[in-house]
Amino acid sequence: MSEEPQEQHGAGTPDAFERLWTPHRMAYIKGANKPTGSGPEDGCPFCEIPKMSDEDGLIIARGDSVFALLNLYPYNSGHLMVCPYRHVPDYADLDVAETAELGDFTKRALTALRKASGAQGFNVGMNLGAAAGAGIAAHLHQHVVPRWGGDTNFMPVVGHTRVLPQLLRETRELLAESWPPS
């Protein structure tokens, strides 16, 4: 007597779909590294990261008032941010020197991304306040997201998954090498 195999449902069961596992996203979903309050002493990652080595903090370049770092949860490969050292929530709170260096670092980020990755376009901007979509609203940061023709395919649109072809540490090293001098 031969026994028929029981039908199984769940993880590991072969089917017609291929899967791209992104377990690192679970930390973002659960709110890991999010500040517990609005002050710099409340666990703000943008206040803690400058104390780390460039490699550990994913820092690309440091200035007098601002620094550039890779986004830990990028929209695209090379997605970086320019962030003031000072814990301020709003662009209007920056002083003249911080505003100037933030602008300069943004220009240098565009140059580095073009050189390192051949970016064809960019999304540049800030989400000021939680209502505007800021994940960490208490500490201003400007996003610089490189774009290429056709880079938005079915994965993020249908599958809500980003495909990144390079590890963050490798991307950081490449961008740091491509960062133009002041």
Image (cartoon, grey):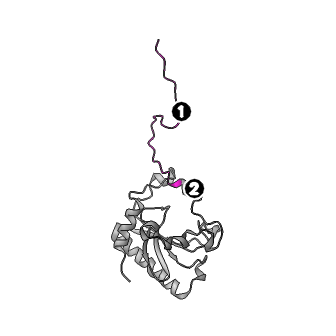
Q: Position of residue 5 (x, y in %)?
A: 48, 22
Across and down, in percent, residue 165 comes to: 38, 57
Vertical placement of 76 versus 26: above or below? below
Q: Position of residue 46 (x, y in %)?
A: 54, 71
Image point 43% across, 71% down: which residue? Answer: 54
Magenta range: 1-25
Horizontal side of 67 relative to 28 (left or right) equals: left
Q: Amino acid at mark 2?
A: Ile
36 to the left or right of 78? right
Q: Which mark is residue 29?
A: 2
Dot 1 amino acid type: His
Relative horizontal placement of residue 101, taking residue 130 as reference (left or right): left
Q: Residues within 10 Å of mark 1 (few under 14, many from 20)?
A: few
SS at circle 2: helix
**What's the residue at 50%, 61% (across, down)?**
73
Q: Which label's residue is closer to the chain start, 1 or 2?
A: 1
